Image: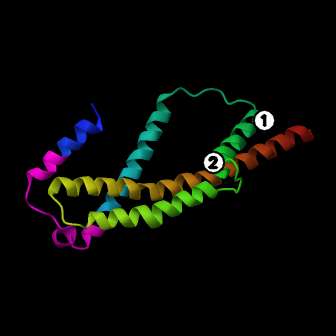
Amino acid sequence: MSSPFLIVPIMAFIAGYSDNYIVPQIEFGLFSFLLPMILGIWFFILFELWMVSIRNTYPLIEAPSSTVQKEYFKVIHDITLKHNDVLKQIKTPYLANILLVLFIVFAVIPFVYWFYFMPSTIIEFIIKLVVLAILLSLVPNIIWNGIVKTVINNKILDKLNYELENENGK
């Protein structure tokens, strides 16, 4: 039911239904620039709350040994953040993440903002607003997952290393 062959003609019909054009700067003033940002932050918070609720639906299991935990967190850090397994021949740490962030922040978001400020019908405006808000929600998401969770992961690894050193030192 979500085939682009169904969605695109329906959206084209709905968007063409109205002849009234909206220019965000005229309709909303300065708020037209802030509206996608506010909506993007709201999307980010809703997404994180949804992830927390999903995580809370599963029963907790007993923690494995410190050695297994250390190996798990080390592998997670290396695969998802440090090397990202995108460019297998290039092992520069964090390269894929840095390139992706730069592309999103300096190419995609400015282009979509430019497109967002073009005159459009009400349905087109809403679609552009939602797409831009989703893209803007990636910025706090990248900060949260790329920086904050990395710091948390490193602190957990340090704690596990300390516990393992104390166990081996006894």
Q: How many marks?
A: 2
Chief secondary structure of the magenta span? helix
In the image, residue 120 sits, relative to residue 127, either above or below, namely: below
In this orientation, which residue lies closer to the viewer: 124 or 72? 124
Quadrant in which the C terminus is drawn: top right
**How dense is the environment of label 1, judged by Cα within 10 Å: few (below 14), some, or many (20 and up)?**
few
Q: Quadrant of residue 6?
A: top left
Q: Identify the residue at image location x=25%, y=69%.
A: 31
Q: Position of residue 126 (x, y in %)?
A: 22, 54
Q: Residue at x 23, y 67 (%)?
A: 118
Q: Secondary structure at mark 1?
A: helix
Q: Is residue 69 above or below residue 108?
A: above
Residue type of the residue flagged with mark 2: Asn
- In this figure, which residue is indicated by the disc labeled 1? 67
Tell me: residue 5, above or below residue 141.
above
Residue denoted by label 2: 84
Instruction: Look at 52% across and 54% down and name the residue there.
Output: 144
The span shown in magenta is 12-33
Q: Under tag 2, what secondary structure? A: loop
Front residue of 129 and 170: 129
Q: Is residue 80 left or right of residue 158?
A: left
Quarter holding the N terminus?
top left
